[in-house]
């Protein structure tokens, strides 16, 4: 199995968005309202290509729609398109990146959605033939939520093949330090981990490679420092549940120090990643 990190674009974020100060004005500061833009950082927005010997091409998240390179408001809406400063090139659309690697985008059979926030789901309409895998609670939260919760219905509200994972089902099993996991393909190679808190139905992905494991944390922690120092981000669906999921990730890294761990928006770590993990 091979895993390729794909840089779908970058978003300019205030440092306090990743590690929110506590106190009365914490949230306002966390949203960057008190930090000069010159101190904001370009955070990567990733997606991942997983090439499985039996299941073929699988995506984890979809990055941005191709239109975002020209006109962010078309896919993201005027509020998100105006509020967020993005750096996205037309060649960064995930379909283009697959084609550049000799992979037919229409042959992608499975897309695992860590969650449905706009920077992960904007590219969903680009893969109408795929089966999308999402936590049932995420689907419910996104369907009833809107801009304030980070969702845009036009990204995911399509009659595609959506498969909802029920982490309360009886066949859900614990794995290592994670309480609720699902073996997606039945061969132990791609394991979905319930890591809610950032959103109500966030999931991470644990991939078993030859001789090592690769943990795609998603936004359960934006950065490796967030894991190491238990940072609380500015925005989350449930603080207590976020910290519970973070604890499972922290204990996993302690138990498996050789595992490769890739976080959701980690500007420091992104340049250090290998181009392909096998
Ligand atoms: Zn998110």
Image (spheres, rainbow, N blue to C red):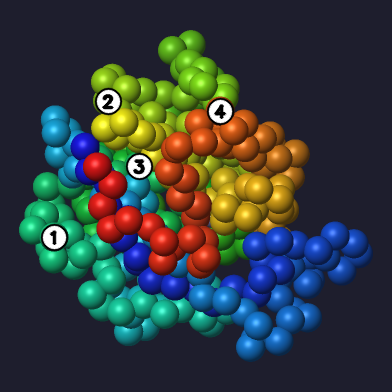
Residue 189 location in percent, x, y?
30, 28
Where residue 255 is drawn, which disc sits there?
4
* Residue 79 sits above or below residue 195 on the image: below
Where residue 101 is drawn, which disc sits there?
1
Q: Quadrant of the N terminus?
A: top left
Front: mark 1 or 3: 1
Secondary structure type for disc 2: loop
Give the labeled residue for mark 3: 112
Secondary structure type for disc 3: strand
Task: State the separation of the CA atoms marked 2 and 1.
Answer: 24 Å
Q: Is residue 86 left or right of residue 209?
A: right
Where residue 185 is drawn, which disc sits there?
2
Task: State the separation of the CA atoms marked 3 and 4.
Answer: 25 Å
Q: Is residue 52 left or right of residue 103?
A: right
Mark toward the start of the polypeptide (2 vs 4): 2
Respond yes or no on whether mark 1 lies under 8 Å from ligand 1.
Answer: no
Mark toward the start of the polypeptide (3 vs 2): 3
* Residue 206 sits above or below residue 31 on the image: above
Residue 72 location in percent, x, y?
41, 78
């Amino acid at each position: 199995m091979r895993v390729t990190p794909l840089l779908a674009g970058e978003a300019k974020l205030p440092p306090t968005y990743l590690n929110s100060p506590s106190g009365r004005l914490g949230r306002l500061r966390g949203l960057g309202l008190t930090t000069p833009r010159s101190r904001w950082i370009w955070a990567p927005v990733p997606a991942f290509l997983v090439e499985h010997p039996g299941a073929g091409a699988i995506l984890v998240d979809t990055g941005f729609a191709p239109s975002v390179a020209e006109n962010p408001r078309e896919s993201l809406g005027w509020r998100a398109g105006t509020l967020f400063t993005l750096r996205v090139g037309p060649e960064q659309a995930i379909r283009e990146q697959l084609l550049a690697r000799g992979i037919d985008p229409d042959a992608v059979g499975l897309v695992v959605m860590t969650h449905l926030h706009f920077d992960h789901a904007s590219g969903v309409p680009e893969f109408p033939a795929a089966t999308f895998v999402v936590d049932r609670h995420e689907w419910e939260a996104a369907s009833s939520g809107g801009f304030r919760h980070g969702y845009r219905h036009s990204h995911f509200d399509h009659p595609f093949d959506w498969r909802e994972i029920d982490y309360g089902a009886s066949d859900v099993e614990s794995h290592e330090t994670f309480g609720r996991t699902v073996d997606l393909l039945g061969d132990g190679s791609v394991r979905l981990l319930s890591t809610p808190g950032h959103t109500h139905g966030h999931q991470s992905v644990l991939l078993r490679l030859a001789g090592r494991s690769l943990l795609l944390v998603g936004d359960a922690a934006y950065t490796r420092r967030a894991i190491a120092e238990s940072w609380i981000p500015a925005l989350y669906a449930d603080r207590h549940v976020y910290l519970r999921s973070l604890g499972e990730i922290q204990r996993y890294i302690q138990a498996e120090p050789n595992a490769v761990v890739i976080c959701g928006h980690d500007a420091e770590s992104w340049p250090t990643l290998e181009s392909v993990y096998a």
